[in-house]
Image (spheres, grey):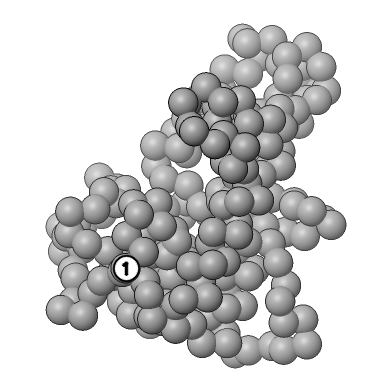
Amino acid sequence: MTTSDLTKCTKGGNGVAVEGLSKLEQELCKVLWRVEIIGKKTRTVPVLMTNELKEALDLLYQRRREAGVLETNPYIFATLHSEGHIRGPDVIRTHARNCGAIHPEYVTSTSLRKHIATVCQIMNLKDNELDIIARFMGHDIRTHREYYRLPDQTLQVAKVSKVLFNIENGNLQNVVGKSLDEIQIQPDEEVPRDEDVEDDYSTIAVSSTASITQTPGQSK
């Protein structure tokens, strides 16, 4: 991720598109930030961030000169006194070894992507929903098809985040056999909150039938 990428970070979605979303999805659009970075093969990959993470990155950006980052270094996760950047896989590998995991070799960005792909296989996703997930993960699994759809920004924040939150909290039973529209978040799950969100939307509704960074990788 570059400093230029961070300055283009946005929250919310297209007004018309948001109107077609559920209350939960509208809430997620209000509390999650979205930024696009360049991934493998120069493919644009979106990253979703909570308010807490966005504030941390803003602080990192504001204090970079005090820490010894060169003005000419374009990266958010910059190495000191050089033009380089810290590699995501190296950071994951280090923390996997230090966290006490029994099999730290399994804690990789590739393993996480495979886990998300496996969860998607046991969900009842429609063809266009598979494409939404694929674009979010940086993969193009149906290059020969195009669908009439809402803007990617709105879909990635509102719908994909529901899958990611359930995976993060270990609630796979909430997504089995469901489409993206059917997935909800349990009342006791922690969901990022925005102090500016109106009271009418402050409580996430869960239906009676209720109840997936950005893949960690080589983000710059």
Q: Alpha-carbon neighbours of circle 1 within 10 Å: few (<14), some, or many (≥20)?
A: few
Quarter of the figure with residue 62: top right
Q: Is residue 193 above or below residue 128?
A: above
Q: Is residue 79 above or below residue 117?
A: above
Viewer-proximal residue among 43 and 69 = 43
Question: Which residue bears the numbered disc 1?
Answer: 173
Quarter of the figure with residue 16: bottom left
Q: Name the kind of residue labelled 1 in the image.
A: Gln
Residue 113 seen in the figure: yes
* Residue drawn where x is 63% and y is 31% of the image: 93
* Residue 33 screen position, x and y as percent: 47, 51
* Residue drawn where x is 35% and y is 54% of the image: 170
Q: Name the side, left or right, on which 149 lies relative to 188.
A: right
* Residue 90 screen position, x and y as percent: 69, 30
Which secondary structure lies at badge 1?
helix
* Residue 153 screen position, x and y as percent: 55, 66
Q: How many marks on residues?
A: 1
Q: Name the side, left or right, on which 63 lies relative to 218.
A: left
* Residue drawn where x is 53% and y is 62% of the image: 116
